[in-house]
Each structure stands twice: as C-alpha cells, then as structure tokens.
C-alpha cells in the first residue's frame, strides 16, 4: 500500500488535494453536500492504490534475439513473448525494453489488457553501425489503472546479449608458405605400391586392426607389421592485432584501430576459408583470445574469431605482451596487423619473427588518420630488413589491395605500389 501511494500520478494527487480541500471547506462553511464530494474524490485514488497494491500479477517474459550475432550495419529482430500466468486480468501495461543508445531508441509498447493465461507477442528491430557486445534488457513494465490514478513500475531480471562483429571483406588468394604443423607419426605422403620400403610401418600392437597389416613387410621382417597411424597435419596461423592506444590515432568508427580490426577480421576469415586453424592474439596477450579456431563448419569457425574481435578495445599499456610465444604451437604462419611501431617494439617484433616459419605484417600509416605524438609509422623498411613481408596501409586503401600487395611481395620482392624501376625494396 505504501508503494502504491508513492506511485500516485499527478491526476491521483490532484484528486486527493481536491478531496481534502472539499472536506475542509465543508467543515468550515457547513455544507454537508461538500462532504460527500470530498469523500468521493479522496476515496477514488486511495481505493485504486489499495487494489493495485494488493494485486499479485504473474507476468512472464521470454526474449529472443534472432540472429544473436550480426555484422555491423545489419539488422536483428528482438521478439518479446509476454504471458499473464496469474488468475487476474491486467490493466494498462506500458512496456519499455532497455537497450544501449548505439542500437537505437528504446522501444516502447502499450498493451491495453491481458486476461488470465493470455499471451502477447511484440517485436522490434535494432541495428548498430559499430562493433561490440551489447546487453539488451531488462524489460520495465508500468502498470496503470483505468482512471490513471496510480502507476506501478516492475522490472524483469532477464537480459540477452547481441554481438555485432566487424565487417569482413573478401580477399584474393596469395601464396602462404611455412605454415604446416602437426603431431602425427609421420607427415602424410603418397605411398607407392612397389615395395615395403615405400610404406611407413611399425610393429603390430594388440588391438590393431588386422586390415592395417602390411603383409609384404611382415614377411620381410618375420613378424606382423602394420601401417603407421597418420595424424593429419594442420596449417596453423597466428593472427596478431596491435590494439594499444599509443599505436593508433583517431576516435570512433573512423579510427585507425577500427581499420586494424576490420583488417584482422578479413584476414582471419580468409585464412580459415583457406583451411588454416587460426589463433587470435592481441597486444595484451588476452587469455580468452588465444584459442585455435579448429576445422568445422565455416560459421562455427569464424563465429568465435569474429566475436573475439568484436570486443577488442584499446589498451593503455606501452609495450607488447608476447607471453604467448612460450606456449606450444605458435610456429607456422604469423600475420600481424600493426599500428605505430616505436623503437622499444623492435626487439619484441624480432622475437616474434624468429618464432614463426613465415611472418607477414600490415603496418598502418597511422599519421594518415590523425597526426600526433607517438611511435614512428614508417616501420615497413625496418620490418622488411628483419625478415618480415610487410606492406603499408592507409585509410583510403582497399583491404583486398593491401592483401594482394603482400602476395606480390612474395613473388617479385616489390608491391604493386612500388615502381618496377626502383632499386629499393622492402625485402
């Protein structure tokens, strides 16, 4: 009752004030008719507040976000299934779902009445031009009486999440070498059928399938020999993203960091499509990002990678965390998307290059976004001199062109933007 009285609307408070004034005037002036009018004006909001305060509504809500992961700029639909699980009908319901402002204005709905066991379904569309992981909910419900005297607020506790991934640009195929890793008995090779020496065999072990017995080798060795178990070799790639604040310029969707994330997303998806198992590592060495995205359906492979990139933020640290180099399985192909590289980063980059069979880098010319203090952006010549295949990238250069320049660099030693008569190359 106390909560209901505190939820009186302006109309309800006006009725109480008018009723109290009528009662006072009736006592002072001696008009008995005003007593009945004043009592009626006071009784209406009080009875309404008592009724709503004593009512026990059982409202249920199921929120569905479809799809729960979209690319920046695409729409997703949020469906709200509202049920009245109680035995009492509801009055006027005002619904407001809480969403971040980047997804649009907060949706509001009005439901006039819901009887017992009734179900209502409403939906709305949200859209975000920026990447990120956004929380949708909780839902706020405002109960109102037919006279508009009292408004009670209720809040559901359930929330849903929406992941907005960076935009992915299709990339052309380029030569990628030095990326094979594996843990099998032997790297797979074509078997000849001419002699036992052409087949990799081992001694028979209890439990081995007899269909794998190599009879010619068994006859030659005098005991049962079986073909070795070949574990498939994988082409692995580590995708490194420099997300330090000191290495980037600009703010919002037009910053160099957002361009770096878009580059990393396009490269990561392209590598997965080429059959690579891709691991994402940021400048902070995030534990949650150091996961190999294994072979499977394309959506299952790219989904976790893009979700990790969706929540990448700027780091305040000045250096690069390379603790991940101490883990197993980091050899193979290394693709780095770098911002401004300072002198203090060169020893770290040299260590990263020596840990990989093949190292490629896209160095952003961050001065093209916004000039300011920081590390040198002309890192391509130094990277090329220390074993990296590196190309520069600016805000106006298409991502496929930058990727194709890396491929041309592997074939000819120069990029498409270098003069064919130039005598100075980056590698």
Image: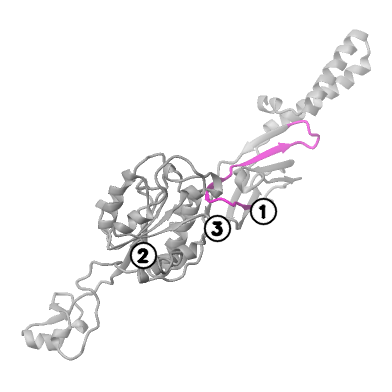
**Neighbours of disc 1 within 10 Å: few (<14), some (14-19), many (20+):** some
**Neighbours of disc 3 within 10 Å: few (<14), some (14-19), many (20+):** many
Q: Position of residue 289 (x, y in %)?
A: 38, 52
Determine the secondary structure under disc 3: strand
* Start-end of magenta stretch: 123-150
Q: Nearer the viewer, mark 3 or mark 1?
A: 3
Image quadrant where one finds the C terminus: bottom left
Image quadrant where one finds the N terminus: top right
**Neighbours of disc 2 within 10 Å: few (<14), some (14-19), many (20+):** few
Q: CA distance from mark 3 to mark 1?
A: 20 Å
Determine the secondary structure under disc 2: loop
Picture residue at 78% right of the left edge, 24% below the top: 13
Residue under circle 1?
123
Above or below residue 319? Residue 384 is below
Q: Nearer the viewer, mark 2 or mark 1?
A: 2
Q: Position of residue 308 (x, y in %)?
A: 44, 53
Q: Nearer the viewer, mark 2 or mark 3?
A: 2
Which residue appears farthest toward the top when viewing the image?
Answer: 28
With 397 as the anchor, is 427 left or right in this view?
Answer: left
Q: CA distance from mark 2 to mark 1?
A: 63 Å
Picture residue at 21% right of the left edge, 87% below the top: 192
Which residue appears farthest toward the left when viewing the image?
Answer: 222
Sequence-wise, the earlier of marks 2 and 3 is 3
Q: CA distance from mark 2 to mark 3?
A: 43 Å
- Pick the residue in front: 401 or 331: 401
- Pick the residue in front: 292 or 175: 175
Above or below residue 315? Residue 193 is below
Instruction: Determine if the magenta segment contains residue 68.
Output: no
Determine the secondary structure under disc 1: strand
Q: Position of residue 85 (x, y in %)?
A: 64, 47
């Amino acid at each position: 009752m106390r909560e209901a009285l505190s939820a009186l609307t302006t109309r309800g408070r006006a009725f109480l004030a008018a009723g109290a004034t009528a009662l006072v005037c009736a006592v002072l002036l001696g008009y008995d008719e005003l007593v009945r009018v004043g009592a009626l004006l006071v009784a209406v909001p009080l009875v309404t507040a008592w009724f709503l305060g004593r009512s026990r509504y059982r409202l249920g809500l199921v929120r569905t976000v479809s799809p729960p992961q979209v690319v920046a700029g695409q729409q997703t639909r949020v469906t709200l299934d509202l049920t009245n699980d109680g035995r009492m009908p509801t009055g006027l319901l005002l619904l407001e779902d809480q969403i971040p402002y980047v997804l649009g204005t907060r949706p509001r709905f009005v439901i006039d009445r819901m009887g017992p066991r009734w179900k209502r379904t409403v939906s709305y569309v949200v859209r975000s031009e920026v990447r990120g992981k956004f929380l949708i909910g909780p839902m706020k419900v405002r109960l109102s009486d037919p006279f508009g005297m009292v408004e009670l607020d209720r809040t559901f506790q359930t929330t849903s999440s929406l992941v907005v991934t960076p935009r992915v640009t299709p990339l052309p195929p380029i030569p990628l070498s030095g990326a094979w890793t594996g843990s099998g008995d032997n790297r797979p090779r074509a078997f000849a059928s001419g002699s036992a020496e052409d087949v990799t065999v081992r001694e028979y072990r209890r439990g081995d399938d007899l269909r794998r017995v190599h009879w010619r080798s068994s006859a030659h060795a005098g005991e049962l020999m079986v073909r070795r178990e070949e574990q498939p070799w994988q082409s692995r790639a580590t995708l490194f993203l420099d997300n330090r604040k000191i290495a980037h310029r600009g703010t919002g969707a037009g910053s160099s960091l957002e361009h770096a994330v878009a580059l990393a997303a396009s490269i990561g998806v392209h590598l997965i499509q080429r059959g690579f198992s891709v691991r994402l590592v940021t400048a902070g060495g995030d534990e949650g990002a150091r996961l190999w995205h294994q072979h499977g359906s394309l959506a299952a492979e790219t989904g976790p990678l893009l979700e990790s990139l969706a929540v990448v933020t700027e780091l305040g640290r000045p250096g690069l965390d390379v603790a991940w180099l101490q883990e197993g399985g980091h050899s193979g192909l290394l693709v780095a998307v770098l911002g401004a590289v300072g002198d203090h980063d060169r020893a770290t980059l040299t260590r990263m290059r020596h840990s990989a069979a093949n190292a490629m880098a896209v160095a952003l010319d961050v001065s093209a976004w916004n000039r300011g203090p920081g590390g040198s952006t002309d890192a391509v010549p130094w990277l090329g001199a220390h074993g990296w295949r590196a190309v520069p990238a600016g805000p106006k250069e298409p991502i496929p062109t930058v990727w194709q320049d890396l491929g041309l660099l592997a074939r000819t030693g120069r990029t498409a933007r270098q003069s064919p008569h130039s005598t100075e190359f980056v590698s």
